Image (cartoon, rainbow, N blue to C red):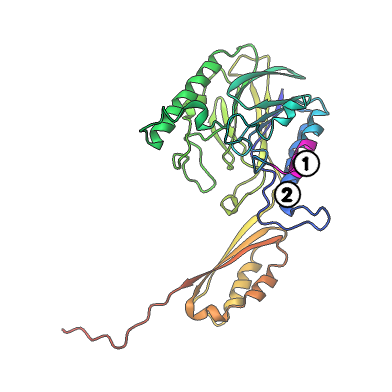
Amino acid sequence: MLIVHTADVHIGVENYGFPDPLTRTSTRLNDFLSSFDEVVNYSIDNNADLVLMCGDAYKSRNPSQTHQREFAKRIAEITKHNIPVFLLAGNHDSPNIRVQATALDIFNTLDAPYVNIGAELKTHLIETKSGPIQIIALPWIRKGDFITSQDTKGLSNTQINKEIQKTITDIIKSEIENLNPEIPAILAGHISIDSAKTSSEKSMMLGKDYILLKSSITSNKLDYVALGHIHKHQILNDNPKIVYPGSLERVDFGEEKDVKGFCSIVLDPNQESGNREQEFNFIPVAARRFITIRSKIKNSDTSPTETVISQIKNHDISDCIVQVIIEIPASKINDLNENKIRESLKEAHFIAAINKNIIEETRIRLDKPLSET
């Protein structure tokens, strides 16, 4: 049973782009769709049994008609080959008010074949070419879904998060206990786990959002735990595998050094629960590169512009999104020719910024009295 796992597609992110002269849409939209196409093509070419999308299909909970069309077109291409798709609701897909629809609910309304939506915490049983599979859906949970303003009266944000953590953990435990051990089982979650790292290597313990402990989703009754929400690919546990595939495209320079891609997992339904994983692979995609170029100008530098350009030539900037950070003494700022620097960056896809960090120089006061000895 081949399962393809992706997350955080974020169709609609258009920063660091410009209108494509042919499509009249943002070049960044083309980037995100191109990376998503790699997931679609891999799933079809390898005759996948299931495609898991663990949240944040869109950048916004109110995607434009163009974004919805392009996403639906690719989902339809997958399901046309009799491959079920499981779409988990992420924070970017979900409304602030519970009664409103998620950005994914249209697929249920249209009764789209082979498309399953995980918009609430419960277990789904999905039929695939290789037999049934159980999926515990853990979508992005709004705080108001599990705790009322009356319950939170007088509580700190930390205390509120702990209450939510306990409530969600108890429900997950109940869902896991009710799994059929004869059928492969996966937990699909769009959530922050305590041991996860962001692209800047900061612990997820920081921040105001509630988190779950890794222990709450670790069980030998699960064959795989597919996560989304954190953009950095990482494996948090080995048995069962607990995996963030990461986003398919870089969103900002904090993700500059991240390898982007998706995951493929092979399960053997004939094995016992906890021993079904046969193969796991991370499949890189050709995501748009981000590059930061740093240049430090000295007081003695007589050609600061050429120094910066020389630094730029040391990098392959073709078709990448680039930012240049120049550390320069205040006395040299007027010697810097930004137009020439921009000209040297013409092979880049987009110049995000040319930032000049000015170093204030320390001057010796000639009128300062000498110390007495």
Q: Along the polypeptide, which appears first: circle 1 or circle 2? A: 2
Q: Quadrant of residue 232?
A: top right
Q: Quadrant of the N terminus?
A: top right
Rounded to the nearest angstrom, the CA distance separating label 1 from label 2 is 10 Å
Along the line of sight, which residue is nearer the eye, 257 or 194? 194
Q: Considering only vertical position in the picture, is 345 above or below 118?
A: below
Q: Residue furthest bottom?
A: 367
Along the line of sight, which residue is nearer the eye, 323 or 159? 159
Whether pointer 1 and pointer 2 mark residues with C-beta atoms closer than 8 Å, the reply is yes
Q: Quadrant of residue 334?
A: bottom right
Which secondary structure, mark 1?
helix
Q: Position of residue 297 (x, y in %)?
A: 52, 74
Q: Position of residue 58 (x, y in %)?
A: 67, 41
For the magenta stretch, what is the residue range? 63-74
According to the picture, the residue beneath numbered tag 1 turns out to be 70
Q: Quadrant of residue 20?
A: bottom right
Residue located at (57% from left, 77% from top): 304
Q: Position of residue 216 (x, y in %)?
A: 48, 25
Residue located at (49% from left, 29% from top): 214
- The kind of residue on which mark 1 rests is Glu
- The kind of residue on which mark 2 rests is Leu
Q: Is residue 363 left or right of residue 125?
A: left
Q: Is residue 299 visible?
A: no
Q: Position of residue 61 (x, y in %)?
A: 64, 39
Main secondary-structure element of the magenta-colored stretch: helix
- Bin the neighbour count of mark 2 within 10 Å (Cα to Cα): few under 14, some 14-19, many 20 and up: many
According to the picture, the residue beneath numbered tag 2 turns out to be 29
Q: Is residue 186 visible?
A: yes
